[in-house]
Amino acid sequence: MAQASTIEWTQATWNPVAGCTPVSPGCLNCYAARMALRLECAGAATGCTKYKGTAKRARDGRPVFTGRINFDEDALELPRRWTKPKLIFVNSMSDLFHKDVPFSFVRRVFRVMQDCSRHQFQVLTKRPERAAELAEHLPWPRNVWLGTSVESAIYTHRIETLRRVPAAIRFLSCEPLLGPIPRLPLKGIHWVIVGGESGPGARPMEEPWVEQIRDRCLASGVPFFFKQWGGVQKSRNGRLLCGRTWDDIPEGDGRGATRMVATL
């Protein structure tokens, strides 16, 4: 269901879909899989089956997604009930463009987003190729943003695919950043988020990797948002980069940047 979010670059999460399948190294310590496993256990006591079967423990004890996809019809219409404009992260517990999410359901999600023009919807996917395949059959109102995850230089090919989608704002989530991306392609990109991995088994992120991306964004006039250094206890490491926070976020029309504090 939709709820207030502690994710620094959004205000609320909306999850009409639950469950996913690991597709790249960025999925190794997925926070959503860890949360899904916890929510399934909690749901067993309350009768909620939204996350049932979506996650399990791997042989090494890590929570991982199983590939099962569940749909939440009750959650689908929730943004209509929010009268105050919000930044809404769509499917923080899944991927809207997972192959097992039927096009008919994707279209219903887009219809809600189209109807709720007071909100800005942030859709993030590791599967931009399916988004590109479906793009011509979907409405792309200016309040629907589309981003893709780029955790290392190996996955910059996702950016080229993302550019094929006619979203008003196209963004990159370099989180968890697992290596340097010295020549991050930014043509046609309107926002970049960078963050380190957090939680059990978190892999370290080096400061020069972050500075490379920040400098490239500054040179290109692309809003840059630094989310966190991460780590097992991320609150101790904070989110300061070079002595300050970096909270730039695009305006709703994609033509400029404003401070997150002003947007919120």
Image: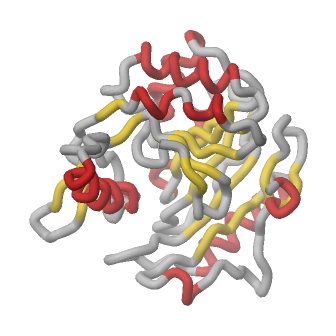
Please tell me which residue is depicted at 65% across the width and 15% down the height of the picture.
Answer: 139
Please tell me which residue is depicted at 83% across the width and 54% down the height of the picture.
Answer: 263
Residue 111 left/right relative to 259? left
Locate residue 218: give its quadrant: bottom right
Relative image position of residue 70 (x, y in whole percent): 30, 34
Locate residue 144: give its quadrant: top right
Relative image position of residue 75 (x, y in whole percent): 47, 34
Count numbered badges in the picture.
Answer: 0
Residue 232 left/right relative to 186? left
Please tell me which residue is depicted at 57% across the width and 67% down the height of the picture.
Answer: 195
Residue 25 left/right relative to 81? left
Residue toward you, 10 or 243:
10
Locate residue 114: give its quadrant: top right
Relative image position of residue 23 (x, y in whole percent): 33, 46
Q: Residue furthest left?
A: 59
Residue toward you, 38 or 110:
38
Q: Quadrant of the C terminus?
A: bottom right
Q: Is residue 212 above or below residue 251?
A: below
Residue 25 left/right relative to 217? left
Q: Is residue 71 above or below residue 89?
A: above
Residue toward you, 17 or 171:
17
Q: How is the image coloured?
A: secondary structure
Please tell me which residue is depicted at 51% across the width and 18% down the height of the picture.
Answer: 108
Relative image position of residue 173 (x, y in whole percent): 58, 53
Q: Is residue 158 visible?
A: no
Q: Is residue 80 visible?
A: yes
